[in-house]
Image (cartoon, helix red, strand yellow):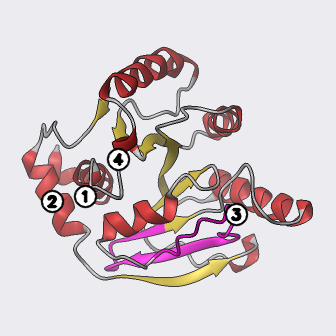
Amino acid sequence: MAQDSDENPDHEKIEFGRKFFAGSCQFFAGATSLENLPSPDLPEIAFAGRSNVGKSSLINALTGQTSLARTSRTPGRTQQLNFFNLADRMTLVDMPGYGYARASKSRIRDWTALMHDYLKGRATLHRLCLLIDGRHGLKESDETLMNELDDAAVVYQIVLTKSDKVSKAALVTFSETFDALRKKHPAAHPDIIATSARKGVGIAELRASLAVLAAPHQFR
């Protein structure tokens, strides 16, 4: 079931997430090949989705910074894996968007291969946030990536973006549809979080969900 800011089932985790993401967050590495990936020292959370789905805006909202991750109206602006250190607690990874992008076919092929190689081989990757534009729902390219993540046993969580532009009835319908699909996707996290970077919807819930990954014993 999709969660939004009107549902707050666990205040302790929400507060923990707020404090966790209140620390400093800085860009420290950009990788265009597996050879120049930074050393895997901290738990990593990666953010993937179709071009222009709002990855950079969501990362900025999570960290409370307006320009940490570069946002653009031009699809395909992120063309490498961008790594951000969150107070030496966790690494956030902004991945290139898939789907339409203003770049050469060879360049798109290169960064798509890098993204898939990273997802399948990074031992410190704790979760992939798979961002889906709430206005458009799942596309074929999203389901293709989901199938690859299932095969690689990489846990991913659906995060709806731009949910302020979608009716609550549409969000419920998406949740019901995904619940039926999830039987075919064993690596999918059961909870969907509906967010809006512009209005702050669901940001606290997503912070809590991700922060708990760095301190699982605290909430047993």
As drawn, which residue projects farthest toward the top?
180
Residue, disc 1: 215
Which mark is drawn over residue 67? none
What is the quadrant of the N terminus in the image?
top left
Helix, strand or loop at disc 3? loop
In the picture of the structure, the residue carrying the numbered disc 4 is 195
Query: Residue 146, relative to residue 180: is it above or below?
Result: below
Task: Say if residue 135 shows up in the picture.
Answer: yes
Query: In terms of sequence position, does the residue under pointer 2 or pointer 1 come before the other?
Result: 2
Disc on the earlier residue, 3 or 4: 3
**Numbered range of the magenta stretch:** 69-92
Residue 76 tag number: 3
Query: As rendered, which of 78 and 35 lies closer to the eye?
Result: 78
Query: Three-letter amino acid code at disc 1?
Result: Ala
Residue 56 on image: x %, y %: 49, 65
- Gap in angstroms between the C-alphas marked 4 and 1: 23 Å
Mark 3 crowdedness (10 Å alpha carbons): few <14, some 14-19, many ≥20: many
Residue located 43% across and 41% down the image: 160
Mark 4 / mark 1, whichever is N-terminal:
4
**Are dots 4 and 2 in contact, CB under 8 Å?**
no
Looking at the picture, which amino acid does disc 2 mark?
Phe
Disc 3 vs disc 2: which is toward the camera? 3
Q: Are marks 2 and 1 in contact (CB under 8 Å)?
A: yes
Any part of residue 155 in sight: no
- Residue picked out by circle 2: 16
Kind of residue indicated by mark 3:
Gly
| Separation of marks 3 and 4 at Cα, in angstroms | 22 Å
190 over 66 or under it: above or below: above
Q: Earlier in the sequence, mark 4 or mark 2?
A: 2
Badge 4 marks a residue whose secondary structure is loop
